[in-house]
Image (cartoon, rainbow, N blue to C red):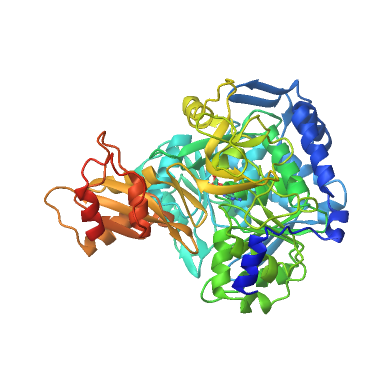
Amino acid sequence: MSQATIESILHEKRLFHPSEDFSNRAHIKNLDEYRQLYDRAKTDPEGFWEELAETELHWFKKWERVLDWQPPFAQWFAGGKINISYNCLDRHLNGDRKDKPALIWEGEPGDSRIFTYAELHREVCQMANAIKELGVKKGDRVGIYMPMIPSAAIAMLACARIGAPHTVVFGGFSAEALKDRLEDAEAKLVITADGGWRKDAIVPLKDQVDKALEAGAPGVENVLVVKRTQQEISMQPGRDHWWHDLQTRVSADCPAEEMDSEDMLFILYTSGTTGKPKGVVHTTGGYNLYTHVTSKWIFDLRDDDVYWCTADVGWITGHSYIVYGPLSNGATTLMYEGAPRASNPGCLWDVVQKYGVTIFYTAPTAIRALMKLGEQHPDARDLSSLRLLGTVGEPINPEAWMWYHRVIGGGKCPIVDTWWQTETGGVMITPLPGATPTKPGSCTLPFPGIVADVVDAEGEPVTDESGGYLVVRQPWPGMMRTVYGDPDRFRRTYWEYLRPQDGNPIYFAGDGARKDEEGYFWVMGRVDDVINVAGHRLGTMEVESALVSHPAVAEAAVVGCPHEVKGEEIVAFVTLKEDLDASEELENELKQHVVNEIGALARPKEIRFTEELPKTRSGKIMRRLLRSLASGEEISGDTSTLQDRGVLEKLRGG
Ligand code: PRX
C-alpha cells in the first residue's frame, strides 16, 4: 500500500468493520449488543458483575456482598471463597478439556512442550507441594525471576494454589532491582532458573539471584532453581534447591486453598513518578472475574483457538493474558521463549505456522520492529490460521496498524487495540472484535462496566476532540487495591490527583487522551514523568536516582525522546561534581551504571553533560525544554520563568 493510500484512509477516518462471518460467530456480535451490555453495566454495575461471577467462575462459597466501596478502597465479592488456580485448572478436568492443550511452549533453540490441562494441573500441584515443603505458608510472599518457560506459569499457579502471593520480577531487571523488589515484598522464597535464552545468548538468572541475595533481601530463606540452560551455576547448600530433585519426592495431590475473594493474589512492581517503584496489589476474586471476562469477549475465545500473547510473564500483560485470563477460560495459551533475532528474523511466523495460531496479541514496538525487518518473513510462512490480532502497551501509530492489518492479518483479521495498565488489572478501553468498527490508532470504546472519560485539570469533562486526562469514574473488579505497604500513596497517586467539584473521587493514572465525535478514545501517551521505552514503563525519577547514585554525578534530569521503533528513548542531562571532566569513558560508565542499577531496559541512549540544568526561579527543572532539546526541536512556549537564560544557549551549543 502506498503512503498516499494510507494517508487517504487515515484522512477519511475510515472505519474497519469485522466480517459478517466473524461477527456471527463472536461472543458479542454487534454494536447493539455491546451497547446493551454497556448500559446494563453502567446502570446496575453490581448486578452486572454478580451475574458474571455466578455464571463464569467456580466459588467454594458465595460472597456476602458484591461491592464494598469506601473510596478509594474497594472490596469485590467479600466473604466469597475462591481459588484462581482451581478456576484455571481443576474445573476443566471433568470433561473433554482434560486432554486439551492448556499450554503450548516453544523454546528459543527450537525445543518445545505441550501440557494438557491434566498435565499442567499435575505439575502445578507438585510445585505447590514443593513450595510448601520449603516452608512457604498461606500469605507468605514468593519472588519469581524466570525466563519464558512453562515453569514460570506453573510457579505462579502453584503460589496461587496455596495462597502465597507472588511477585514476578521481569528477567531483564538487574540484581539490584531484583533485590529492591524482594525486600519491599518481604519475600521468603525465590523461584528462578539457571538461565534463559535471549537472542541466542544465556541470561544468567541464578547468578543475578545470588548477587541480589548477597546485597540484601535477608528474608529470603530458600531458592528453588529450575534447570533450563544447563551452564554451571553455584548452589548454596541449605538455601538452594533444584526443582527436578524436589519434583521426584513430592506428591501430585494438592487441593486448592479456599481463599477469600479479597486475599492478595500478587504484587507487581511498576514505575511511577518517584524514584521508588510501586508494588501494585491485586486480589483474587475480582481479578479472576475481570481477566476472565475481558479475555473471553475481547479475544473472543473459543475452544478451538490457539491463542498467543507475546508479552513476558514479568509484566501485567503476561499475568492477565498469558496465564490467568486464558486458562480460566479453558483456552489453549502459547508461550514463546524467543524473539526475532539475526539468526531467525522470521521466528514469530514460524511459531504461528507450526501451531496454527488463531489469535495473536503483541505490542506496537514489536510491530514496528517487524515492519523494519520486512514483509518477506511473514510472506514466506502460512499465516492463514490467524483470525484476530491485538495490540497493547503504547499508542499504535496508524501506519503500523495498517501494516499489521494487511501483512499479518491478510486484511481479514479485526485488530483489538487494548488500552489498560498494571494498575487496572485487565483491559479497559478496547474494541470487541465482532462488534466494534475500528479506526487505526484508536482503542475505541470502554469495556462494559468501565466508566471512562476525558477531563481537565479540575476534573471536569472536556468537550469532544480536545485533549485532557484519561480517567475512570467507577470501581471495577480488576482494579488494584492498594500500593503494597503504602495505602496512602495509593490514595494520593491515583485517586486524589484530580479533584472534581462534585467530590466524587476519580481514578487517574497518567495518560492523556481525547474523545472524538463518536465517543472513540485516542490515547496520546503519558502526561506524567513516566516514559515508555519499547513498551517498558520507566519513571524518569527512577533513572535519575540511578544516575545520581554514581559518585561522579551531581545532578541528573532524564527525558524521553521519540524513536521510530521503540516509541521513546532515554536521554539524560547530567552535571558532574566540581572538579570532574566529561569524557566518553565516563559516559559509557554512567550508562553501564544505570544498567546495573535497573536493567538493560533503562540504558540511556545518550548522556549530555552540562554545567547547569535549566531551572525555574523556584528551582524546578524545566523538563519541557530538555525534551525539546533532546528531540532536536525548536524551543517554543514560555521561557520567561527560566532562572538563567544563558543555560539554554550553552545546552544548545553543547
Ligand atoms: O501509557 C499507557 C500505555 O501503557 C501504560 C501502562 O503501562 P503498563 O502498566 O506497563 O502496562 C502495559 C500493558 C497493559 C499506559 O498508562 N498503554 C497501554 N496500552 C495502550 C497504551 N497507550 C495507548 N494505547 C494502548 N492500547
Camera-side residue of 439 and 113: 439
Q: Does residue 637 appear anywhere in the picture?
A: yes
What is the x, y in percent for residue 408? 68, 68
- The relative height of residue 31 versus residue 25 in the rendered view (above or below) is above
Q: Seen in the image, is 152 located left or right of residue 389?
A: left
As drawn, 114 above or below 514: below
Q: Which residue ends up furthest to the left in the rendered image?
A: 579
**x%, y% of residue 19?**
82, 61
Q: Is residue 596 visible?
A: no
On the image, the x and y values in percent for residue 109 come to: 58, 71
**Closer to the camera, 219 or 52?**
52
Q: Quadrant of residue 464?
A: top right
Name the spot of residue 457 as percent of width and height, x first. 50, 32
Quadrant of image for the C terminus: bottom left
Q: Is 451 positioned to the left or the right of 650 in the image?
A: right
* Residue at point 26%, 51% (across, down): 574
Q: Name the one closer to the observer, 488 or 569.
A: 569
Placement of the N terminus among the 4 image quadrants: bottom right
- Say how many tags the image has: 0
Q: Residue at x 74, y 38 (%)?
A: 448
